[in-house]
Image (cartoon, rainbow, N blue to C red):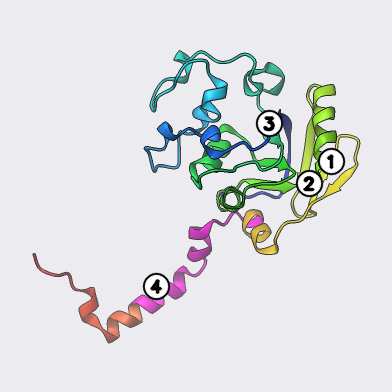
Amino acid sequence: MQKFTTHQGLVCPLDRENVDTDAIIPKQFLKSIQRTGFGPNLFDEWRYLDAGEPGQDPASRRPNPDFVLNQPRYAGASILLARQNFGCGSSREHAPWALDQYGFRAILAPSFADIFFNNCFKNGLLPIVLPQAQIARLFDEVAAFPGYRLTIDLERQVVVLPQGEELPFEVQSFRKYCLVNGLDDIGLTLRHKDKIQAFEAERLLQKPWLGQRLAG
């Protein structure tokens, strides 16, 4: 998992409340359990004017010029600005996969759905909760200033505005540790690889039949 310490990026505003996971990555794209290839279908039904199918070449699609991701001023954005209850609906882990694979590293919103919030941390995506008034102000500033960028300092737990003002945010210490060190659940387990291997070797010495395969 990619480490997250400090990130500076262009901000893209998604001015909709209660964005659910089916809007983030529609159900027809959930046929694969591979953790790659979901970025082109992020917000698919809003992003394109035609219906998309798994494996379809994005270049053959008709983009919706009115959707924010298709507007040139937000090309290359890596910070998503959202409204309340972002990520509601079903618990599909494909939603943070799609956001991450599109290029987003962080999401700022007044609130998130619980399961989506947890899934973000497990996949290297930082969800930041800020007061609704601060989020509203950021929407205004993004609209007013093309090329609006923010700096997110996870170690100091602040969002730094272009003029230098800092907005503090909370993050649970264990989740912060995992993001700063780039550790997902597998990475956390592999920190103890030597102990696991030693345990398995000792177990086979004591119970060698466990290492035998059943015939047939």
Frontmost residue, 201 versus 77: 77
Q: Which residues are magenta?
A: 180-200
Q: Quadrant of residue 204?
A: bottom left
**Disc 4 designates what residue?**
197
**Disc 3 designates what residue?**
16
- What secondary structure is the stretch in magenta mostly built from? helix
Frontmost residue, 18 versus 213: 18
Gap between marks 1 and 2 measured at Cα? 6 Å
Q: Residues within 10 Å of mark 1 (few under 14, many from 20)?
A: few
Gap between marks 2 and 4 measured at Cα? 44 Å
Indicate the amino acid at tag 1.
Answer: Gln
Gap between marks 1 and 3 measured at Cα? 16 Å
**Disc 1 designates what residue?**
134
Quick one: SS at disc 1? helix
Which badge, 1 or 3, comes first in the chain's sequence?
3
Q: Position of 8 compared to 123: left or right?
A: right
Tag nearer the camera, 1 or 3: 3
Residue 168 x %, y %: 83, 51
Does the CB distance between marks 1 and 2 fall below 8 Å? yes
Residue 125 colored in magenta in the image: no
